[in-house]
Amino acid sequence: MKNRQAFAFILLITVGALLMSACAGSASYSEPAYDMAAEAPMEEVDFYYEEEMRANTAGAAPQISDATYVEGQAIQRIVLMNADLAIVVPDPVASMDTITAMAQEMGGFVVDSNLRQVQLDSGLEVPSGNVTVRVPAERLEEALDTIEAMATEVQSKNVSGQDVTREYTDLQSRLRNLENAEAQLTEILGNAQNTDDVLDVYNQLTYIREQIEVIKGQIRYYDEAAALSAVSVRLTADEAVQPLQIGGWQPAGVAKDAVEALVKTMRFFGDAAIWILIYLLPVLIILAIPVVVLVFVIRALVRRSKAKKAAKAEKAASETEA
């Protein structure tokens, strides 16, 4: 019984020390397991990858950039590059086939694609589609140039990069610590004699191995996501962006011209009002001041002259009566 208690005590201390060591490797990372949903769409956070993805990325290195230093050790920065485009093409169906063939030729594959019919205001139905492919990260620019070359118009283009160096390094550190714990527990299991001791160590070993598989899956996701960039393309037919025509008449064009004419007219009146208030009105006021003064002076002189004439007339009349 004493031996049994001693063994359980030693096992408890050993497992606790190993788990603390594993946690110490990720002291800067607060969660016990990295939440991949916070970094990528849920459909991509699947650690059980298709055989096609594993075949296409076998031996491929993650997309890396200049070296950086973490805790004094030089490491390579890992960046996940993705792109999103919206383009107008003459034939969306043919363009989707071309994009699919391009991805496969580059060593990538199609993630998903869909094609649908869109009815225009004129009643005409035209195809419209979406396709997402993965291509080697080092050939991302080449893939984008190829896609843009087949477009009559590029409506939008967005290329984004996500630096996951810190998360990747943290996962590798945790993996090393857990693998060390697994090796020590395996050694303890080999020396255990009592059945209960064997079960206790086996349970701990099973838990450690589950954590190792989860972290390996997360690392594998980063490796594959960095090696293959996702390119999402929205394809619209030329007819869908052309103006409406009725027997050669384009109502949209006429309405556009009318709006432009209205804007020009309102702009003219607005400019005229600004010139009148800011320039013409002050100038008129300045010119009107001497004119008003002159009018008052003339009127005063006229009144004085009339008063003198009236006074003379009254004096002459009084002298005549006398």
Image: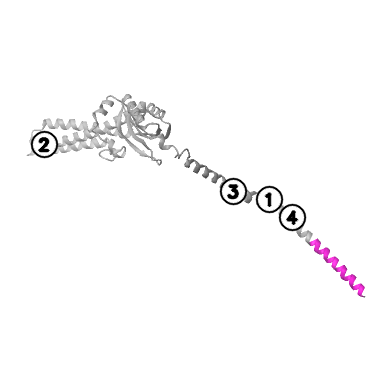
The image shows residue 149, relative to residue 269, as above or below, that is above
The three-letter code of the residue at mark 1 reads: Val
Tag 3 residue: 269
The span picked out in magenta is 300-321
* Residue 106 picture location, percent across and down: 33, 24
Which quadrant, please, contains the C terminus?
A: bottom right
Question: Mark 1 vs mark 4: which is more N-terminal?
Answer: 1
Tag 1 residue: 283
- Circle 4 sits in a helix, a strand or a loop, which is it? helix
The three-letter code of the residue at mark 2 reads: Leu
Q: Do the residues labelled 1 and 4 touch (CB within 8 Å)?
A: no
Determine if the magenta segment contains residue 231. Answer: no
The front one of 192 and 216 is 216
Q: Residue furthest left?
A: 1
- Circle 1 sits in a helix, a strand or a loop, which is it? helix
Could you give the CA–CA distance between mark 2 and mark 3, rounded to whole angstroms? 92 Å
Could you give the CA–CA distance between mark 4 and mark 3, rounded to whole angstroms? 30 Å
Question: Mark 2 vs mark 3: which is more N-terminal?
Answer: 2
Question: Mark 1 vs mark 3: which is more N-terminal?
Answer: 3
Is 186 on the left or on the right of 258, as rendered? left
Q: Within 10 angstroms of label 4, few (less than 14), some, or many (20 or more) residues?
A: few
Tag 2 residue: 199
Question: Mark 2 vs mark 4: which is more N-terminal?
Answer: 2
The image shows residue 300, relative to residue 146, as above or below, that is below
The front one of 300 and 26 is 300
Of marks 1 and 3, the one in the foreground: 3
The front one of 196 and 254 is 254
Q: Within 10 angstroms of label 1, few (less than 14), some, or many (20 or more) residues?
A: few
Q: Do the residues labelled 1 and 3 touch (CB within 8 Å)?
A: no
- Circle 2 sits in a helix, a strand or a loop, which is it? helix
Could you give the CA–CA distance between mark 1 and mark 4, rounded to whole angstroms? 13 Å
What is the chief secondary structure element of the magenta stretch? helix
